[in-house]
Amino acid sequence: MAASKKTKLVEDLDTLEPMLTRLKLTAIRDQLDTLLDQAVRAELNLREALTMLCTAEVARKDERRIQMGMSIAKFPYVRTLEGFEYDAQPSVDPKQIRELATSRWVANGDSVLLLGPPGVGKTHLAVALGREAIVRGYSTLFVPATSLVTQLARAHAEGRLEDKLLHFTKPKLLIVDELGYLPFEANAAHLFFQLVSRRYERGSILVTSNRSVAEWGGVFGDAVVATAILDRMLHHSHVVTIRGDSYRLRTKRRAGLASQASAKPETTSN
Ligand code: ADP
Ligand code: MG
């Protein structure tokens, strides 16, 4: 009697895998035997077992989404907040970075300026904060300032400026790296201004720069445009100013001191 009841509900066990494939529940499909074993061993009831299966599936989907977001973002390298040594950079306030890591500023459409001399970890923090934003579901795009300006200028010359502006306006977070290493031409400053206006109060922008805000007039080659850009960027902004030595020089110097002090060479991470 019991057997015939079962046959009515489940006609063919072999349909399970194809159904899981069709429903795109690939994590459950790929680990089915292991997951079911675990459920039996832990004596889970049906609801608990279903929760466990769905948890595995959601974890896989999240992982894929983050991987996809990371590859779309075009980061120059992989860096995380866990890999940032605060001891090496005492001018960085861990509390401020932890707050930024929540990505609330991205949700609010605020800006972040990471300022400081070369090698102090600006790009590292920019990439790590970008990753945090992606983990929380915000689309992110990283672009070096010179590449951004070149792309906008070329699109402008070819009559495709609208498309290009749209491309850089779409992501919820745009990271512009190394603003100020090269001064902008007048036309470039105008194009950058158009982008900043488009994004204003719609999406967040994170800028890293080796120039202080006071020097931006010189970077944009036009005090009026610089003021207009700063006006928008500094409204609802978080500024992280890093002072101190280049991380690479610092580790090299420490290695040098260490080998003077003892015969054993110190290993350095780079
Ligand atoms: P910049 O300020 O010029 O953008 P980067 O962020 O590229 O400097 O840092 C240079 C290198 O040093 C990178 O590989 C980065 O990961 C590393 N680095 C810099 N500061 C730190 C830090 N405080 N902890 C760990 N690595 C760091
Ligand atoms: Mg950098």
Image (spheres, grey):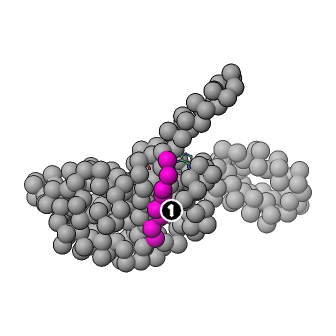
Which of the image's four quarters has the C terminus?
top right
Other-residue count near label 1 (Cα within 10 Å), few / some / many at <14 / 14–19 / ≥20: many
- Tell me if I can see residue 171 in this picture: no
Q: Is residue 265 above or below residue 45?
A: above
> Residue 66's spot in the image, x, y percent?
53, 54
Check disc 1 and give the amino acid type: Ala
Is residue 241 magenta-colored? yes
Is residue 257 magenta-colored? no
- Tell me if I can see residue 128 in this picture: yes
- At 85% from the left and 63% from the top, the residue drawn is 45
Which of the image's four quarters has the N terminus?
bottom right
In the picture, measured across the screen, residue 35 lies left or right of residue 19, that is right
Q: Is residue 175 above or below residue 106?
A: above
- At 46% from the left and 70% from the top, the residue drawn is 238
Which picture quadrant has residue 11?
bottom right
In the picture, measured across the screen, residue 251 lies left or right of residue 228, that is right
**Segment tinted magenta in the rendering:** 238-245
In the picture, measured across the screen, residue 205 lies left or right of residue 94, that is left
Which picture quadrant has residue 101?
bottom right
Closest to the observer, 10 or 192: 192
Q: Is residue 208 above or below residue 232?
A: above
- At 76% from the left and 44% from the top, the residue drawn is 33
Closest to the observer, 217 or 155: 217
Q: Secondary structure at mark 1?
A: helix
In the picture, measured across the screen, residue 108 lies left or right of residue 167, that is right
> Residue 227's spot in the image, x, y percent?
25, 73
- At 18% from the left and 61% from the top, the residue drawn is 221
Cβ of disc 1 within 8 Å of ligand 1? no
> Residue 36's spot in the image, x, y percent?
79, 50
Q: Is residue 215 above or below residue 148?
A: below
Find disc 1 in the rendering and name its residue.
133
> Residue 64's spot in the image, x, y percent?
54, 51
